[in-house]
Image: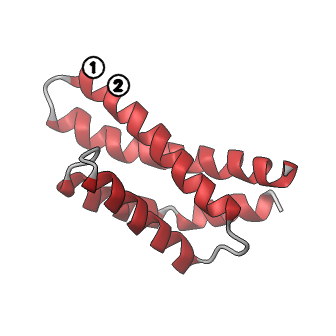
């Protein structure tokens, strides 16, 4: 269990950074009410990062395909629940998929 926790923290931190950077850039440059958007973005990034980290750390083996499928599934669920706009969801998927190397590196470090 310690190993999963260690991996989860590393992966979660990496994903959180990617999410925060990508989402913040989009929202803060597109909306006039930055403070309100900042709170929503922070909560969304935290929730999505936790969900994605949980999926990755509970899997027996994580491949690029598995990671991409998890990203697709989770972002689609967040879009369906209207937590993420469709346009933002597409960008979010792209940003998260680009972070595979960072996630892979964190997984290797914490094995």
Would you place residue 73 above or below residue 29 in this image? below
Residue 79 relative to residue 99: left or right: left
Are the residues flagged by discs 1 and 2 in contact, CB closer than 8 Å? yes
Label drawn at residue 89: none
Residue 35, image x and y in percent?
A: 27, 19
Residue 22 relative to residue 99: left or right: left
In the image, which is nearer the foreground, mark 1 or mark 2?
Answer: 2
Residue 94 relative to residue 101: left or right: left
**Snapshot quadrant of residue 74:** bottom left
| Label 1 crowd (10 A; few <14 / some 14-19 / many >=20) | few
Residues at marks 1 and 2, CA–CA distance in whole angstroms = 7 Å
Residue receiving disc 2: 39
Residue at 19% x, 56% y is 86
The C terminus - image quarter:
bottom right
Residue at 79% x, 59% y is 109
**Snapshot quadrant of residue 39:** top left
Label drawn at residue 35: 1
Residue at 24% x, 38% y is 27
Residue at 62% x, 62% y is 56
Residue 12 versus residue 59: which sits nearer the camera?
59
Residue 75 versus residue 93: which sits nearer the camera?
75
| Label 2 crowd (10 A; few <14 / some 14-19 / many >=20) | few
Residue 29, image x and y in percent?
A: 20, 36
Callout 2 secondary element: helix
Residue sitting at the far top: 35
Colour setting: secondary structure
Would you place residue 55 above or below residue 9 in this image? below
Residue 92, image x and y in percent?
A: 34, 56
């Amino acid at each position: 269990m310690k190993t999963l926790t260690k991996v989860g923290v590393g992966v979660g931190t990496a994903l959180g950074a990617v999410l925060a950077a990508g989402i913040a850039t989009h929202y803060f440059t597109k909306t006039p009410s930055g403070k309100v958007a900042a709170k929503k973005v922070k909560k969304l990034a935290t929730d999505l990062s936790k969900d994605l980290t949980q999926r990755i750390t509970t899997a027996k083996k994580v491949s690029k395909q598995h990671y991409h499928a998890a990203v697709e599934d989770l972002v689609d669920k967040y879009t369906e629940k209207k937590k993420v706009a469709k346009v933002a969801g597409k960008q979010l998927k792209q940003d998260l998929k680009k972070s595979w190397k960072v996630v892979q590196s964190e997984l290797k470090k914490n094995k």
